[in-house]
Image: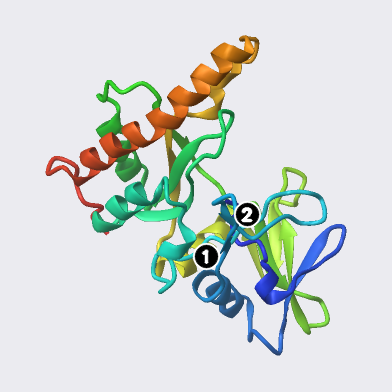
Amino acid sequence: MNILTPTREIHAIISESKEIVAEKKVMGNTDDLLYHLTHNVNNFKNVNGRINSGYNENGLLIAVSVSPYSKTFIQNIERGILPVVKALLKKRYLTYSSCEGHCIYSRRFVGVAFSSEKDRDNFVCAFTPLKYWGITVKCFDRVCNSYFSMSKDGTRVVKERLTEETAEYISQDGRFLSKKQKEIETFNVLFHRNYTQYFFCELIILDEAMIEKYKGLSKIKCIGLWCYKAIGWDYITQKVVKVIEGKSFNKYRY
């Protein structure tokens, strides 16, 4: 799921480079908008079981990152990954994104945020000794793909995608923030924190990358592999849940 993309509930107006997501008369400032998007706006469940906000005009899947402190947080989590998310929440971990996986070429994962690199490393190490095939943890220093700011005329809030071409410093309410600093502010609203830095990782169960080498297989073998993944997803997921619920798996200290 992308970070803070608009949904039908706020009637996003999409242009080529920017998306107007709310009028100023609805939200007083950017932080108010971020809080609204992460606490009051929900994704919706499709007939195929996927939970998201649909697609934008460019065909890209969009979804809202709902705060774990939102009253409707659980209804935004897909069934297959829900046990892992619940187990992490009980241990006080901060999750920002998840997906149950929907085909042989997709993955099941949950994104977790930390205030220090040491805490993230401890989390990764807890899964390193596991002998179950298909469990991986990938680390990231930045995950946000967009930021919000007031329009020049001060009448609305606009959303602009962060790309490698985006200037390193972006103007926000008369201040200049790096992309990393803006991301920190966003997650502080999401998590009710006041961190000065964030580190991220994705706990992945049967990554899509592991399927790449099987693309040349016959149809029968592909069907067999799909069946294994369909069954293995839930089996390995339960193993991961037991690890997190275990006494040796430390609670997140903040």
In the image, residue 235 sits, relative to residue 40, either above or below, namely above
Residue 134 percent coordinates (x, y): 40, 25
Q: Position of residue 99 (x, y in %)?
A: 50, 46
Circle 2 is placed at which residue position?
Answer: 179
Residue drawn at x 57%, y 17% as measured from the top left: 222
CA gap between label 2 and label 1 equals 10 Å
Tell me the SS state at disc 1: helix
Examine the rendered structure and indicate whether residue 208 appears above or below residue 166.
above
Binning the other alpha carbons within 10 Å of mark 1 as few (below 14), some (14 to 19) or many (20 upward) gives some
- Image quadrant of residue 41? bottom right
Q: Residue at x 66, y 67 (%)?
A: 7
Give the amino acid at mark 1. Glu
Residue 145 coordinates in the image, percent (x, y): 64, 51
Q: Closest to the observer: 156 or 207?
A: 207
> Is residue 136 in sight in this rendering?
no
- N-terminal of the pair, mark 2 or mark 1, is 2
- The answer, for residue 203, to whether it is visible in the render is yes
Q: Residue at label 1?
A: 185
Please tell me in which quadrant of the rendered image residue 182 appears. bottom right
Which residue ends up furthest to the left in the rendered image? 247
